[in-house]
Amino acid sequence: MEILFDFFSPPVFPNDEEKTRSAYYVNATTLSSMFVLALLLIVRISSGDGTSSNATRIVMGMILALGIIFVLEKNNYVKPASYLLIITLWAATSGLAINGNGIKDIGAISYLVVIALAGLILGYRAGLWLTALSAASIALLAYAETQGMITYDNEPIFNAALELTVLLVINAIFIYLTIHSLQAAIKQAKEKSNDLEKSNHELLKLQGSLEDKVKERTNNLLKANNENKRRAAQFQTVTQITQKIASERDLDTLLSIITEVISTQFNYYHVAIYLNDDRQEYTILSATNSEKGEHMLERGHKLQIGQTGMVGYVAKTGSFRLAMDIKADAMYYGADLVETRSELTLPLRAGNQITGVLDVQSKETNAFDQADVEALNALANQIMIAIQNTRLFAETQTALAESQLLYGTVVKQTWKANVQTNPQIGYRYTGVKPVPLTKEVFTPEISEALENGDIAVTHPSRRKDGNALAVPLKLRESTIGVINIKLPTDTEIGEDEIDIVRAASQHIAIALENASLLEESQRRAKREQTISEMSGKISSGTEIETILKTAIRELGAQIGGAQISIEIGSENE
């Protein structure tokens, strides 16, 4: 049964809906017409009409032609089968009209059905052409009848009724197919309309969704942009504080600047820095930016570590503390700062030791997010570095001042010792060679240079024998001598000459300092060598008498003209 159904089914073309539709109408028209015409043929033959009448021959020809059309259509030749079907039906209609009563025959009405079927299968152009051809055929039949070219035989009433019934059945089939096609087209149009309406609804919905997404995306971009700006400002703050760390050496000034920068860049109304005392009992307010914080700073505000508020907690544990709403945090303590609504407290850590706390407070609840915590934590690390660097710088400066003072004392003592061992008071140069001074020289400019420790110049108005210049020789801020220069009256002492002499005095002082230290080092080395040799000789003895004699002899050799004795007695004497 399935094989038979497949045999009579029209071909299907998945990629060509129009061709599939044409194949369906050709197949339905062909099979239904063949079936009706076959019944008509059987009836006519059974009634004794035989195959000699023109009507029977036309029916047989139509059945043959429809068979050929069916074969073409089954072999996918839909277009040729469609044309051949319309031609066959039109020719049969014309033949029946000629064989019957001409244009007065009821079969002529079949032209309308054939035209409609042609438009359905082949398109409206084929229907128009077939309409024109049918009109011409009717005109020719009318002309032939009027001229007596065609005569009609009266058929029996039964045969005429049978032919009319067949025509009605065939026309009914054609009309059904036409109406079915229109209904299918209307249904398809409605489906497309519904699909279009549905698509429009989905498009409107999608448009609304896209608008919402665009709006949401725009808002997200704005939020991201604002967040990026805020993060950029935070990084700028870190950079500013880092620069301050590199340039500022005073701890109090540095901490005050840091609180101001954080408050300005992060928009927090109160920023404070606490430093723990040496005994780790209290954390003391050391810098702040707010007015009320300044009052707290003036009265020496401090909190007990581990006991009072979030600051005391962080100073003890070293873990940051965040209160998004201080009313919901029992640990909050801030009697002076009544405007505070949220607070973030971060430890200032040096290695494993907690040295202080960074306290940030806002007038708004939920004022801190994760980015703020990370940025402020980075700032807390920078602040701790700043504190360490500043303290280290202060300690270094103190140690340097102490070492300079000690070094200056050593240099002065060394110079004093050198002066005592080398009584030469100076040298004079008059254009030939340097000669030692036999006595100290005192002039007004020399006295002024020694007294003030600065350059002194005497012009001819004060000295009759010419110009004079006195430049002090300074050793570690102590004046140890003077360079005195006399020039003729007509030679003026200019700035160039003064600069040259000043530079020379500086180099002379440095050279004297180095030479003095070198001589002192050599004396110490010689003294150590002498003591070492004496110790070696004394230690080489094995008897008391030999050791004592060696000691006296060596001391006498080193201290000329001295009387030396060593007396040994018992502890009780």
Image (spheres, rainbow, N blue to C red):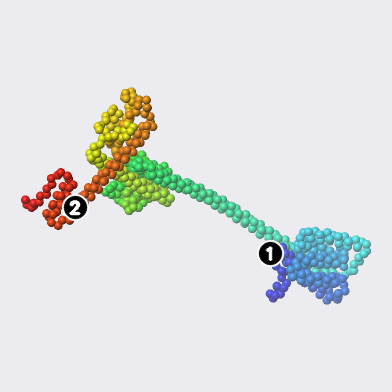
Q: Position of residue 549 (x, y in %)?
A: 13, 52
- In the picture as drawn, the residue positioned furthest to the right comes out as 148
The residue that disc 1 covers is: 15
In space, the residues marked 2 and 1 are separated at their CA atoms by 122 Å
Residue 485 in percent (x, y) is at: 32, 31
| Residue 54 in sight here | yes
In the image, what residue type sits under mark 2? Ser
Q: Is residue 46 above or below residue 525?
A: below
Crowding at mark 1 (Cα within 10 Å: few <14, some 14-19, many 20+): few
Front residue (pair 117, 346): 346
Q: Is residue 487 left or right of residue 134?
A: left
Please tell me which of labels 2 and 1 falls first in the chain.
1
SS at badge 2: helix
Report which residue position mark 2 lands on: 535
If the image is split into quadrants, where does the N terminus sit? bottom right
What type is the residue that disc 1 sits on?
Answer: Asn
Q: Nearer the viewer, residue 24 or 160?
A: 24
Taking the spot 36% from the left edge, 46% from the top edge, the residue there is: 386
Q: Residue furthest front?
A: 432
Q: Which mark is residue 213?
A: none
Residue depicted at x 37% and y 33%: 499
Quarter holding residue 563 = top left
